Amino acid sequence: MTQPKTIIEKIWENHTVLSEPGKPDLLYVDLQMVHEVTSPQAFEGLRISGRKVRRPDLTFATMDHNVPTENRASITDAIAKKQMETLSSNCKEFGIEVADLDSPNNGIVHIIGPELGLTQPGKTIVCGDSHTSTHGAFGALAFGIGTSEVEHALATQTLWQSKPKTMEVRVNGRLAPGVTAKDIILAIIAKYGVDFGTGHVLEYTGEAISGLTMEERMTICNMSIEAGARAGLISPDQVTFDYLEGREKVPSGEAFTQKVKEWQELATDEGAEYDAVVEIDSSEIEPMVTWGTNPSQGVGVKGVVPSPTEANSSVDRKAIEQSLEYMDLEPGTKITDISIQHVFIGSCTNARISDLRAAAKVAEGRKVADGVRAMVVPGSQKVKLQAEKEGLDKIFTEAGFDWRESGCSMCLSMNPDFVPEGERCASTSNRNFEGRQGKGARTHLVSPAMAAAAAVNGKFVDIRNLKEPAFK
Amino acid sequence: MEPIIKHTGNTGVLPRVNVDTDQIIPKQFLKRVERTGFGQFLFFDWRFLANGKDNPDFELNQSQAKDASILISDHNFGCGSSREHAPWALQDYGFRVIIAPSFADIFYNNCFKNGILPIRLDEEQVYKLMENGKDEVYEVTVDLQNQNITDENGFEASFEIDPYWKEMLLKGWDEISLTLQYEDKIDQYEEKMNV
Ligand code: SF4
C-alpha cells in the first residue's frame, strides 16, 4: 500500500513541475486572482520586459480594496480611481476577465472566487493578498503572494516554492451555542500565538470543523495568516461538493460527477502524519473579543484585559505593553466594560450572507446605541442582492445601521471609510493592527453577532445573555 | 537588480516586536501604480508628527541612525499583509539588509525578490547589535558570500540562508528569466495534466 498522505502533500505533488535538490520546487498555479492594489506594478513589469500573460484563462480580476461603498458612480479619490482604471486597461491589454464595478460578480476577491465556483478542491490558488488562504476551505492550496510573484505567475503560471511543513489543527468536540467560526479561529490564535503556523500549511480537522458550513469554514481558513501560516485548508467533503454544485464556473452533469470523484481522493488519508499537531477543545471556546493590536491578543467576552506581568516571555510582555498603550486600556478592565463608537460588519472574513443573517438577527427590533456609528458592508454585490431579497437591509437600516455597497471598506480603510483617531471599533474583520482602520484607530475583532450586539449596546455584551437569543 | 555580495553600512535600530506591514508602509500610500518612490512614506505614522515634522522620538530619526542601510529589529518583523510595497519602501529608503530574530514568512521571501537581504540571527546576537547601535553610529559588514556579520570590535556572527536565494542575490538575478529557461517543462506539465 502506498504511504498515507495529507491533502497538502497530495496537492503539492500534483502541481510540481520541477523538483531539484537544494532549490524550491517549481509549482504550477491553477488559478490566479488579481485585484487593483497589488497588480499594477506586476503588469508594468511585464510590459517593460515585453512578456505576455501565459494563461489569461486561468486568471481572474476584481476591484475591491479601494472601491467606494457609498456612491460607486463618483470616485473622489483620484489615485484610487487611477488604480481601478489601470486594472481595467491592464486586463483588456492582457486578455483577462475582470469583474469591474459594473459587474454583478464584483466583490471582495476572496468572496467572489468561491461564489463563482472558481475556487475548487485540489487547485493551487494564488493572489496578491494574504487572505487568499480563505480558498483553502474548499481543500485548495491557496496562499498570498507579493507583487513580484504576481508578475512571475502571470508570466509563467508557476511559482518557486519551498515545500511547506504540515500542521494539523484539531478542533475537538462540538461548539457551544453562541460560539461561531470566528470565535474558533480567534481562540486558536489566542492560545497558540500569531506565529505558531510559520513555515507550515495548516489543515483544520475535528468534529467542530466537519460540522461547519462552507461559509464558516472560509472564516476559519481566512485567518490562517494571522496564525503565521501562508495557507490553511480543510479536506473537502459532501458539504464542499454541495456548495459547489451548480455554480457558474463549476462543470455540470456528468463532468461534475467525475470531478467529485477526483475531489474525494484528495482528503487526507487515514494514518497520514503531520509535522506538527495542535489541538483545542470546543468547550474552551467562548465568544471572543480582541483587546490588543495583534489577533492573538484576545479573550472570551467574560474575561478581562490582561496585565503585562502575566506574560510568559519578555517578548510577550513587550507586546502587551505596546498594545495596552495604543489601545488605551488598563489591565483588569472587564471586556464588557469597554465601550465602542464604531461598528464594522464586513470583510472577507465575515461578510457572506450567513454573517449578515447572524448580525441581522441581533439587530432586528433593536436600535444602534447613541454615539455609535455602525455600518454593514456586504462582501460582494451578489451577497448584497441576496440580503436585500431577504429584507436584511431593511432590518439594518431600521435599526440605524448604514447599508453599503460591497468592498473591503473599513477592513483596511483604503477607501473613504475609516475610524477617527483614538476611537474604538468593534469589527468583524481579521486584523487589529495599529492604524489598520485609520491612524490611531482602536480595533476590537469579534464575530458578526457580537459586533451587532456591541452596536446596539454601545459596548461589548455577551450575546448569550441577549433576551431573545439571537442564535441557536 | 543590484547584486549584494558584501555590504558595509550604518545600522538603524528599531527595538520593537511584531513590526507589521501596516506600519512599514501605511495603506494610504499603496495607491500608486509605480514601483518606486515609496521610501518617503516608510514608517510614516511613527516617523512623522501630525504637523508633518519629523517625530523626534522615533528611533530611525535619531542622528546616529541617519543613512542607515542595515535595519535591526525584533521578533516577527514584517508580519501582516503580503504587500510588496513594504520591501519597496524599505529599499527605496536605503535599507539593503534587515536583521531580526524572526521574520514573517511572506515578507521574508519578498525581501529576496526585491534585492534586500533578510537575516535571522539568535535573539542574543540581535540584542547585542541593538545595544551597540542604539546610541551611536555603528557600522557592520555583512558578507553574503561567507554568510557572516562582523564589526570592527570583534563581533562576529554567522547566518543561514537558502542557497537558492543566496545565488539570486549574489548575481542580482530576475526570477522570471530563470524560470523561463524551464518553459518546456511547463509546457509538458500542462499537456500531461490537461490544463
Ligand atoms: S476584506 Fe480586508 S483582508 Fe479581505 S481582501 Fe479586503 S482588505 Fe484584505
Image (cartoon, coloured by chain):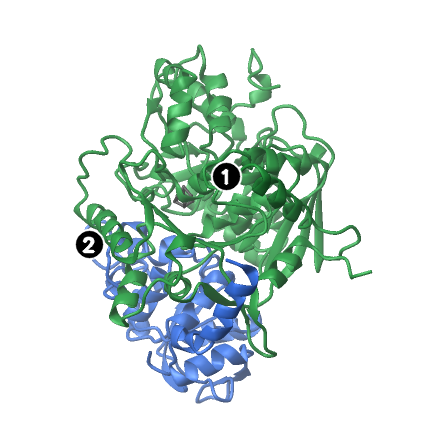
Mark 1 — residue? A291
Residue A289 in the image: x percent, y percent? 53, 34
Q: Secondary structure at mark 1?
A: loop
Colour of the chain lettered B: blue
The outermost residue toward the front is A254
Residue B93 in the image: x percent, y percent? 28, 69
Using the image, determine if residue A374 lies above or below residue A201.
Answer: above
Tell me the quarter of the picture where residue B44 sits: bottom left
The foreground one among A50 and B187 is B187
Q: Is residue B63 left or right of residue B189?
A: left
* Amino acid type, label 2: Gly
Q: Quadrant of the N terminus of chain A?
A: bottom right
Colour of the chain lettered A: green
User: From mark 1 to mark 2, how far is it between C-alphas?
Assistant: 30 Å
The chain holding disc 1 is A
- Give the quarter the ligand 1 occupies: top left
Mark 2 — residue? B52
Q: Secondary structure at mark 2?
A: loop
* Amino acid type, label 1: Trp
Q: Is residue A382 left or right of residue A414?
A: right
Residue A64 in the image: x percent, y percent? 33, 42
The foreground one among A173 and A463 is A173
Residue shown at the point (27%, 51%) measured from the top left: A87
Q: Is residue A51 left or right of residue B143?
A: left
The chain holding disc 2 is B
Asked if residue B100 shows in the view, the reply is no
Residue shown at the point (34%, 76%) measured from the top left: B69
Residue A78 in the image: x percent, y percent? 17, 46
The crowding category of the residue bearing disc 1, from other C-alpha atoms within 10 Å (few below 14, some 14 to 19, many at least 20), is many
